[in-house]
Image: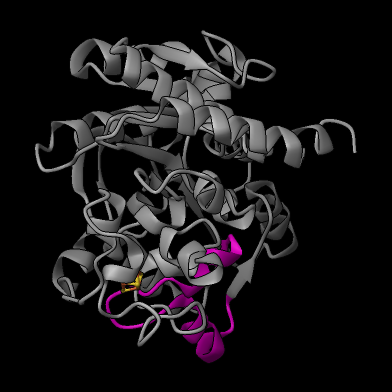
Amino acid sequence: MKYIDEYRNKKLAGVLSKKIKEIMPLSGIRLMEVCGTHTHNFFRFGLDKILPQSLKLISGPGCPVCVSPQEYIDKALSLVKNKDVIIATFGDMIRIPGTSSTLEKERARFGNVRAVYSPLDSLQLAKNNPDKKIVFLGVGFETTIPTIAISILLAKKEKLKNIYFLNSLKLIPPALDFLMKDKSVEIDGFLCPGHVSAIIGTNAYEFIPRKYKIGCCIAGFEPLDILEGIYLLVQQKVRKKAKVLNQYSRVVTSLGNKRALGIIKRVFTIKDSSWRGLGIIPGSGLEVRKELSCFDADKHFSLKTCIEKSGHKKTRCRCGDVLKGKIQPDECRLFRRLCTPENPYGPCMVSNEGACNAYYKYH
Ligand code: SF4
């Protein structure tokens, strides 16, 4: 298959793995693969088996389902009980545990949760159900945000009065900055996500080598992309020259997608945001602009008050430590015993892109 098979060539993978082994420093290296798709493909294609053991790949906070906070799910759960509401959401979101339940369990009771493939589907749902209020759960990073922004603009253009967006949208660069400020986190380089970078461009990461003296490499998602990205990061570490490199130049430019960035800016303003397992990260979230706030579910349903009352449930899930690279998933005491993809205790086990899920399937 054009542009797929070329990047899955086993012989070339062997060559790259040999090159990495040749330059690998004795002290070892810890690289964070920021994106869940990197995590998943790293194990799916068995790259862990052809790389030196002293190279540690840490899963970062780049799985939108994994970082959606418990209170966000609680907000959605509080809406499910409203018989006038239909919740529209991506399939994975249905299974994430909130404080006391999941949307999947509540769907069985109330029947008003629908899985959709795109926020645009929720517009159609609104047109087909004029007597209901449709609430789309908007989660995702810079890759998904433009489509959600377009959906809000379309809802305005089409004068829809029964659609609302409950957003937990996240920005990747502030999360990387936050991780690097944590002195207990040990990272020698970031393997940056190809699709997010296609929107924000390579320049968005320049602060990392400048402030923290570690390298970044934007990489695609096929095995050879990932291996070449790792090779470029190891090389930077060995040469002690930290900079931003772009392995994925067939898709990513230095300035990113100006049109998509313009649409995001038209619809959202930046705010602080809560990440599951990490806490509040300054400037890492987005809020619908005042002039479009009639589509903001938080405002329409006054959800903040309900959540402050609900409080947080303490669980033994260690997703936060997994996302910071402090432990590997199998170091969590619940892994494989109580926490499985069929019965996930934490969000990292729910999504295909979650580190615990990938470990469970392939490790
Ligand atoms: S194994 Fe389950 S409980 Fe443990 S960190 Fe992963 S998701 Fe959380």
Q: Residue at x 43, y 69 (%)?
A: 349
Q: How many marks?
A: 0
Residue 249 percent across, percent down from the top left: 63, 15
Query: Where on the image, by quarter, is ligand 1?
Result: bottom left
Q: Nearer the viewer, residue 133 or 9?
A: 9
Residue 233, image quadrant: top left
Q: Pick whichever, 87 or 175, lies toward us.
A: 175
Asked whether residue 177 is drawn in magenta, I would say no
Left/right of residue 277 with respect to residue 60 in the rendered view: left
Let me know if residue 227 appears in the view. no
Residue 265 position, x and y percent, is: 45, 21
Rendering coords of residue 300 (x, y %): 38, 54
Q: Which stretch appears magenta?
A: 87-112
| Vertical side of 238 occupied by 109: above or below | below
For residue 193, above or below residue 343: above
The picture quadrant where one finds residue 100 is bottom left
| Residue pictured at 51% horizontal, 62% vertical | 358
Q: Nearer the viewer, residue 286 or 300?
A: 286
The answer, for residue 79, to whether it is visible in the render is: yes
Specify whether residue 105 is painted magenta: yes
Residue in the picture at 28% in, 20% down:
214
